[in-house]
Amino acid sequence: MEPLAFRWTALDPDDSTLVSILKMNEARNWDDFTTALRDFVVPSQNWVYADVDGHIGYYAPGRIPIRRTGDGTLPADGWSGNAEWIGWVPFDQLPHLYDPPSHIIVTANHRPAPASYPYNLGFDWYEPYRAQRIVDLLKGRTKLTPDDFARMQADTISLHAKTLVPLLLARARPAADADRKAVETLRAWNFDATADSAATAIFQAWFWHLVPAIAADDLGPLITDLYQAKFSFTTRFIINTLTTNDTSWCDDKTTRRVESCDDAVTKALHEAVVDLTRRLGGEMDRWRWDAV
């Protein structure tokens, strides 16, 4: 086994994050607040701000390394110096907002900067579904009450499903009656993932069975790692595979024929319906998401 060296900003002796938090407790305005955040090192956080004068703001502080080469996702050689950290992303250039014209600030674990952002902030973001749903609910509203925010917190519309279901339905070739009924149930769905929704149960089971249908023959025991990966990574993998029709993934290497992505999607649908029938019974109309 080769030795590995690991560097993390949290292990640097000059970590001043606690000082930053103490200063924030004494901040009286945006300038005080951002001055305090300059001392924030790790872990990088999404901080939101509001004051009694009606100002709102957002900052994603943290000590983010600038690498000579690479992005830190894979081990790099330690002898050439090519992967060394050569500085930090300047504080003033970290993602931030202050009194945006939209009067809306949303942070929901999604990427805090556009693709054009000049610095590498990592890749481990959640997909923007929650963030977009929040924007949809806030857009055009001028006056909100605590009850409005309570309803937003309890909102169950799934933009994740709204994105994926059309991709799946376009490739599904159901043969069994139960599989066809599952497809029709999803076609009629409004993507509201309520507890009593049969469509939500079908979609989630289909999504769950799709990963091994596509990748089990390629990854073998490592398929568990893909299951345990962040939901966002699994979602991106499925979307990229289906939109590019990547048969190198969709083909089942354990068979002689070359399977298409349509085959993988259809197989996953059938396995999902069989799974739900075993767990919830044969009356599909009585399936519930909260029973899965």
Image: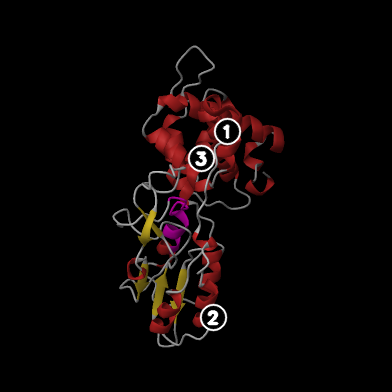
Q: First in sequence, mark 1 or 3: give its number.
A: 3
The foreground one among 10 and 29 is 10
- Under mark 2, the amino acid is Leu
* Residue type marked 3: Leu
Query: Considering only vertical position in the picture, is 27 above or below 17?
Result: below
Q: Earlier in the sequence, mark 3 or mark 2?
A: 2
Tell me the distance, in whole angstroms, between the alpha carbons under discs 1 and 3. Answer: 27 Å
Task: Find out whether residue 115 is within the magenta segment.
Answer: no
The residue wearing badge 2 is: 22
Quadrant location of residue 38?
A: bottom left
Q: Which residue is mark 3?
A: 186
The residue depicted at 56 percent of the width and 70 percent of the height is 150
Q: Which residues are magenta?
A: 123-134
Residues tagged 1 and 3 counted as in contact (Cβ below 8 A): no
Answer whether labels 2 and 1 touch (C-beta < 8 Å). Answer: no
- Residue type highlighted by circle 1: Ile
- Quarter the N terminus occupies: top right
- Residue 196 at least partly seen: yes
Relative to 195, is 244 on the left or the right? left
Q: Which residue is mark 1?
A: 223
Q: Could you classify mark 2 by the number of other residues whose Cα lies within 10 Å: few (under 14), some (14-19), or many (20 or more)? A: few
Tell me, yes or no, if residue 205 can be seen here.
Answer: no
* Residue 127 lies in the magenta stretch: yes
Q: Is residue 212 left or right of residue 283?
A: left
Which quadrant holds the C terminus?
Answer: top right
